[in-house]
Every structure is written in structure tokens, then in C-alpha cells.
Image: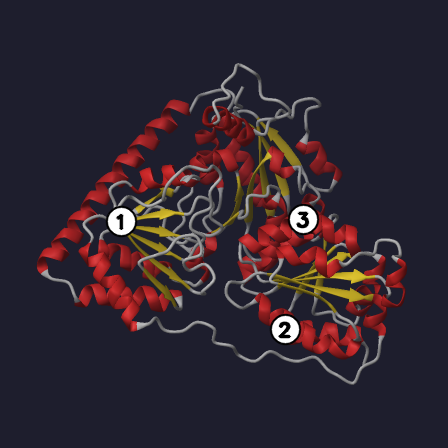
Amino acid sequence: MRGRDVFMNSLTAHGVRHIFGNPGTTESPLLDALLDYPAIEYIVALHEGMAVGAASYYARASGRTGVVSLHVAPGLGNGIGMMYNATKANAPLVVTAGQQDSRMLRREPILSHDLAAMAAPVTKWSTEVRNAHEMDEVMRRAFKVANDPPYGPVFVALPIDVMEQDTANVAIAPGRSHRTGAPDPDGIQEACALLRAARTPVIVVGDEVARGGAMADLVALSERLGAAVWFEGIRGHASFPSAHPHARSSVPFDAAAIRKTLGASDCVLLVGGAFFEEVWFTEGSPFPQGAKVVQIETSARPLAFNHAPDVGIVAGMSAALQALTAALGSAADAAWTAAAQARCAELAAHKARDTAAYTARLEKAWARTPMSMPRVMAELRRATPASALIVEESITASVDFAAAFAFDQPDQYLGARGGGIGQGLAGAIGASVAQPDRPVLCVSGDGSAMYSIQALWSAAHHRLPIVFAILVNREYRVLKHNLDIYRQRFDAMSEKPYPQMDLAGPQLGFVELAAGMGVPGVRVSDPDAVAGAVAAAFAAGGPRLIEIEIEAKR
């Protein structure tokens, strides 16, 4: 048996159905071996970053480990940005790259480099297979590490000669690993005591609740406690129903603004996330003065990583939330229950006011030209099938997106973690491969779309039912917002324009770009035409693109 056979059999043993990749010469052993493994489909990308981005979203949408094949040093370099995003999204990936023949690496042949060293900063584990005899163990460990909480990418370099070496070893099938346990009873009781003593408790939730299938458990806890639920500033999943009376919006991106958002809360419960991801430095704690902090995580690494909670718990997410809800119930008395119910009523009234305020905002913006972001999102929502999976990278339109699209299940939404742009179009490929029976709506800004525009070709090549809605304002609008903030924060106020942030010269033509890659498209500037265009695109059944002209920041 050759090293390449052990490699391919390892993928089969771990239930791999797809490889995302961009082929190259050093990947010849893998590509040739694929002909003997028809159960594994190769999803072709025209750029390595797109392959990694697609595999990351595939892993998040399917619950399977994403597998990627890149091409030596430049190809790995092209993929590293998306590997960073996958790390931030806790996506379990096994990323491989073909390496030059190990017998000549000392001579630094073309395209060679220390691949394991290149990948190490953005992976949980990075290695190179030295000979065929260790292929079985390397691959077993790669899948194990990728799927140990917190999930994330690993990297394996595959020298072309090692893939062709003979070995008596065979692929190792994974055992069943039960990685999450019951919460510590003492920790639950301590957390319960702090929450019971709070008059204004609040919850901040991250992606781990959705990943652990614990949305209903968090709903039950928030209702028992009478606590508002805020979201991480950047979220990759829907962890709490956005239309629920307790649901609020995302927290801001600096400590002072987070502290102001949490207001008079005297106890903050952090659940399953990276708390907090900041963009701007401000002095002080993100928590209100005197507030107690409880944190629940499924692994030890994020617990107390940035902030020291008063009580920290590592456990399975559902088990911990259920235990805490039960403890609050068993300790409840009439006065505490009445106070919690009063908080629930106040939150419902607050939600109603927020909804009314957004309705007024939508009505005010309804007839604006160019098309307003609230109007675009309302039209997209109106024409999108209820069964659709939404992949979103709308960035400065994200507030209006969140108001228009209500998610009550964790499998309805995938967002871009990590902050690196270009994930939306690539991610839609992986999401569609993961759930082939569902239509996919990809909402992306024009600047983001150009980072992975090659995804359109992959969508056409694999006949994926994706509707790409590209919001075109011909600018990097988020950078203009951030430049305004920078000028204010660093006392650099001026009347200067926004440098290098416009995309109007020459003007990008997404319909033409899509046509060149085999995807039919239409350009829409009339808001009354958006819903019809979206409905027609979904009805067509294959990949379609809609270029939507929206208002810009000038």
C-alpha cells in the first residue's frame, strides 16, 4: 500500500465526502487517487483562498470535517487568510498542501518552503509527513485535533515522494470520543447564587450555543431569569431567536461602548463565545462597575481568557444551561419569580418599541433613491424561501439585515467570523455543498465580493442552487465609517475626503463578471423590482446573480 492510499483511506474512514481544492503538480498523487474513490467529490476552486473559505462554511453547515487540498507554498499562502477566519469561526478543517519531493528540499526547488512553519500561526497543529509509515497516525491525529473543542483547522504537508512510498500500515478509523461533560454542581450553585442576587441580569451569547444545539436551552434560561440576550459583535451562527422578546442586537467593538450597552446590569452571563472582540481601544472594563460575571464554555481555552469571571464553568452547553435553569427554578421563591416575570414584561415592551422604531425607519427610507439598505433587506426577505440557508456578509448593511431576517433556528444562518472580507461568496459554495437540498441566499457587499469572485465559476461548474445578491455602492463603506471614527478618536478631524475607498473608476460590472463565469445575472436599481428578481432567481434552480444598486456614503 502506498502513502496516498493510506491518506485516501483515512479520509474514507473519517466519513469525508468532499475535498475542496485548487489542483497543482505536487497534488498529482491525490488527484490521481481520486479516480479510485468515487464516493469523494472534488469541489474545484479557482483560488486557494476560496477553497479554504468554502470548506470552512461546509464544515459549519454540515457538522463534518472540511478537507482542503492546496498547492505548495504560494497556494498555502493564498489560503492563509481564510485559514485565519476558519480559526476564528472554530471550523474543523484538515488543510493539506502538496510538497516537493523531500529528497531535494535542501536544494530549495521551485515553489518549496517550510509549509508547516507557514501554516502554524493560523492552525491548531501543523506538520509534514516525513515518510509513508507515519501517514496513518498523522491523519488520525489531524482529524482528532481539528475536532477537539474549540474546533479549528490543522495543516498537513504531503511530499510527493512520501505519497508514493510503500508501507504496511493502514488507515486508522476514529473511535467515538465524548468530549463534553456534565457541569460541576458547585459551579452551577455558585452561578445560580450570583444570578438570583441580581436585579438586572443580562446574557451575552456567542456561536457555541448554536454549534452545541442549545438554542432552546438558552431561551428557557433567559425566560426563567428575565434577562436580555445580546450577541457578540461579529457572529457566525444564530444562537438565540432574533424575534424573541428578550433578543437585543450585537454588542459594540470597544470596552467603553460595551459597558454602556450593558447599562445598569449587575450580573453578566457570558455564554459560549469570544468575549470580547474589540476594534478600538478604550480604557476600562467592558462590564458595568460592580457587576458580577459568570462564564460558561465548552472548552477551557476561552474561559477567563480575556476577563476573569467570578464563576467559570466548562461543560457541554446544553447540560450547563439546563442545570442552571433547573437550579434557578428549584431555588425560586414568590418574590424572585415575580421580579423575573416583571423583567420579562419590561423586555417585551422594549422589544415592541424597537420594532416600532425600525418600522418607522423602514417607512422613512422606503422611497429613497438610490435604494436604501432597509428597503433592500425588506425586499430580499420578502422573496426568499422560508427554507433557504442565508450566508451573509453585508457588513455596513448588517443592522438592517438583522432587522429584516428573523432566525429562530441555528441552521438558518451563517455569518463571517474573523473580520477578513471575501468569505460570503466562498462560504456559499461550501454551505450549498453541505446542504444540497436547500436553496442558498448569499448577501454580500461589492467590495467583499471581489475578494472571492471566482466562487461564481465554482457555483456554475457544480450547478449549485445559490442566489448571489451583491449590494453595490461602489465603495468600501465600512472603511469610511472607520476613518470617521479614527479621526474623531485620535483628534485628527479634517475636511479631507476618503482616500482610496471608492470603487467607481472603473465601475465594476457584476452581471458581466458573472456571465463570464457561467452564471446568469440581472442588474436592479428600481426597488420595486428587487423581490421579483430574487423570486425568479430562486425559481430558476441554479446559480444566479442579482446586482443591486444601493445608496452610498459620500
Pointer 1 or 3: first along the chain: 1
Name above or below for residue 293 compared with residue 329.
Answer: above
Residue 224 in view (yes/no): no
Is residue 397 something that shows in the picture? yes
The answer to which image quadrant residue 514 occupies is top right
Cα distance, mark 1 to mark 3?
49 Å
Residue at position x 63%, y 80% in the image? 173
Q: How far apart are marks 3 and 2 (CA)?
A: 32 Å
Q: Nearer the viewer, residue 501 or 268?
A: 268
* Residue that numbered label 2 is attached to: 141
Spot occupied by residue 350 in the image (x, y as percentages of width and height): 25, 39
Q: Which amino acid does label 2 sit on?
A: Arg
Measuring from the top left, give residue 91's x and y in whole percent: 56, 58
Element at label 1: loop
The amino acid type, in three-letter code, at marker 3 is Ala
Place of residue 525 in the rendered image (x, y in percent of width and height, measured from the top left): 56, 25
- Depth check, mark 3 against mark 2: the one in front is 2
Q: In which quarter of the image is residue 9?
A: bottom right
Q: Residue 384's x, y, as percent?
A: 49, 43
Q: Which amino acid does label 1 sit on?
A: Ala
Q: What element carries label 3?
A: helix
Q: Tell which tag, 2 or 1, sits nearer the viewer.
A: 1
Q: Is residue 264 shown left or right of residue 378?
A: left
Mark 3 and mark 2 lie on one chain; the one further toward the N terminus is: 2
Which residue sits at x=36%, y=73%? Answer: 182
The mark found on residue 437 in the picture is none
Q: Name the residue under label 1.
A: 291
Is residue 354 positioned above or below 305 on the image? above
- Residue sticking out furthest to the left: 334
Per the rendering, the mark at residue 459 is: 3
